Amino acid sequence: MTGIAVSTTINGDTIEYLCQPDETLLDVLRDRLGLTGAKEGCGTGDCGACSVIVDDRLVCSCLVLGAEAEGRRIETVEGMAHGDQLHTLQQKFLEHAALQCGICTPGFLIAAKDLLAKNPDPSEEEIRFGLAGNLCRCTGYDKIVRAVQDAAHVMKGA
């Protein structure tokens, strides 16, 4: 395949791939690299299901070209757990039943991770604002907010 050669860091690992000039980062992650955690919900950046962190900035990977990842540091939901040990946010989402169908869950987890990295002690309002770019059609948002609050509390104490 011909295309643009990209070298980037994903979840701490140096990765190289070829992509087409118009190929999104979401498509690269899912179709070329097998990182299927990020989901395509809308393809227009409105739902947050494809959220990833690029150089410490939360982005919708459907709005970023794969070629733009050159030299960047990317974090996906696959990088949150360490082996069999879930990230605190993942554990709290399970404990609070903050998921149902699962399409939005990876995006919420990444958005919450980004939020807590920037604000380790957010109020309920700050959590709701920090997660506002993510849509869920199954759970409502209360369980998600409670899971993030609980994770923040545990992570503060760690």
Image (spheres, rainbow, N blue to C red):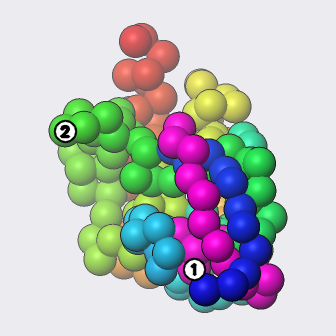
Q: Secondary structure at mark 2?
A: loop
Q: Secondary structure at mark 1?
A: helix
On the question of residue 24 being in view, the answer is no
Q: Which residues are magenta?
A: 12-29
Q: Nearer the viewer, residue 141 or 16?
A: 16
Residue at position x 24%, y 37% from top? 83
Task: Tell me if residue 123 comes above or below residue 145 in the rendering.
Answer: above
Residue wearing tag 1: 27
Residue at position x 77%, y 69% from top? 67
Sort mark 1 into few (<14), some (14-19) or many (20+) by Cα contacts within 10 Å.
many
Q: CA distance from mark 1 to mark 2?
A: 27 Å
Disc 1 versus disc 2: nearer the observer? 1
Q: Position of residue 4 (x, y in %)?
A: 76, 74
Residue at position x 48%, y 16% from top? 156
Q: Earlier in the sequence, mark 1 or mark 2?
A: 1
Task: Tell me if residue 154 comes above or below residue 79 in the rendering.
Answer: above
- Amino acid type at circle 2 is Asp
Q: Nearer the viewer, residue 91 or 56?
A: 56
- Amino acid type at circle 1 is Asp
Quadrant in the picture for residue 1 = bottom right
Residue wearing tag 2: 84
Sort mark 2 into few (<14), some (14-19) or many (20+) by Cα contacts within 10 Å.
few
Q: Is residue 15 left or right of residue 72?
A: left
Q: Is residue 147 left or right of residue 38?
A: left
On the question of residue 68 being in view, the answer is yes
Quadrant, the C terminus? top left
Q: Are marks 1 and 2 in contact (CB under 8 Å)?
A: no
Q: Nearer the viewer, residue 52 or 134?
A: 52
Task: Tell me if residue 137 comes above or below residue 37 in the rendering.
Answer: below
Quadrant in the picture for residue 47 = bottom right
- Asked whether 158 falls inside the magenta stretch, the response is no
